[in-house]
Image (cartoon, helix red, strand yellow):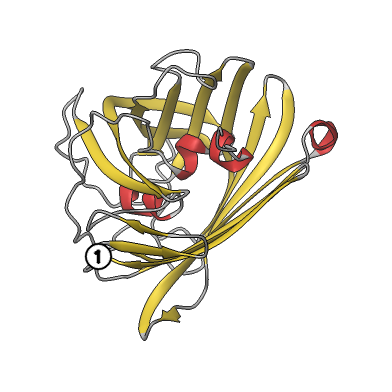
Amino acid sequence: MKKHKNFLYLLGLALLLPNLAFNKKAQKVNKAGNKNRCFSLGESLHYRVHYGIINAAKITLRVHDEMVKVGGTETYKITADGKTIGGFYYLYKVKDHFESYLNPSNLLPMKYYKKVRENKYRSEDLVRYDHQKKMAYGKKENTPISAAVQDVVSALYYARNIDFSEAKIGQSYPVDIYLDQQVYQLGFTYLGKEILDSDMGKIACLKMRPQVVKDEIFESEDALTFWLSDDQNKVPIRVRAKIWVGSFKIDLSKAEKLRYPLARL
């Protein structure tokens, strides 16, 4: 049976997973040990999703104001919410919610929760990670994982803390992602620097491209491109996705409580 690929996963693929690409030939996962240098408590990122000229959906990413204990460890609680809006809502009714709880010492997820509601489809899961035992314990089943695995929310905040200061064009970055009781070996490629005219003004950006597999969703292997702000925040500014039924653009429309000034020009 083909797995349901939820709306936030499809539309926010490169936004929530800027390093997600179904590239099973990618190298093994990068090592754990990153510490947060890019985001602060209370940070909120608001995005608009455009399907052609249609304002189709909105996505909000939020780091909660206070640390939350998981198994005795203080963690960053990060939520991601996506829903369709306007006329697009009547075509495809979506209200998705995701949570990830990150250990501040290494930015590895300790707990993950999702609640997906899309038309008549419903899915809910709660996962606890044991990185030492290399296991993910879910409501439905337990899954062997790699030691430094990320989930669909934590991956973004982990990637934002990668040091790109000496990156060379064409350089690739691997990461392992836990998704629906499976672990995928994924990666993205650095394409250089670019200035974007965005809803937030002119922004200096780092341009990236995940390697995706041409399938029932993506029309080509270069179907996804995303841009991170070229500053200490490394905030996703824009995502473009070409799929078989058209193209999506995801733009940052509002940013609150950033740790550093945005790289406006």
Where residue 85 appears, x then y in whole percent? 78, 40
Would you say residue 176 is visible in this rendering?
yes
Is 197 positioned to the left or the right of 170 in the image? right
The kind of secondary structure element at disc 1 is loop
Crowd around label 1: few <14 · some 14–19 · many ≥20 (10 Å): some
Where residue 25 appears, x then y in whole percent? 23, 28
Q: Which residue is mark 1?
A: 106
Q: Residue furthest front?
A: 1
Give the tally of numbered discs.
1
Instruction: Tell me the kind of residue under disc 1.
Output: Asn
Where residue 148 appears, x then y in whole percent? 24, 56
Q: Tell me which residue sits at (29%, 55%) in the image.
A: 145
Q: Tell me which residue sits at (55%, 37%) in the image.
A: 3
Q: Tell me which residue sits at (45%, 60%) in the image.
A: 141
> Looking at the image, is 254 positioned above or below residue 240?
below
Q: Quadrant of the N terminus?
A: top right
Q: Quadrant of residue 39?
A: bottom left
Q: Quadrant of residue 243?
A: top right
168 and 261: which one is in front?
A: 168
Is 211 positioned to the left or the right of 169 in the image? right
43 and 112: which one is in front?
A: 112
186 and 228: which one is in front?
A: 186
95 and 52: which one is in front?
A: 95
Is 79 positioned to the left or the right of 160 in the image? right
Q: Quadrant of the C terminus?
A: top left
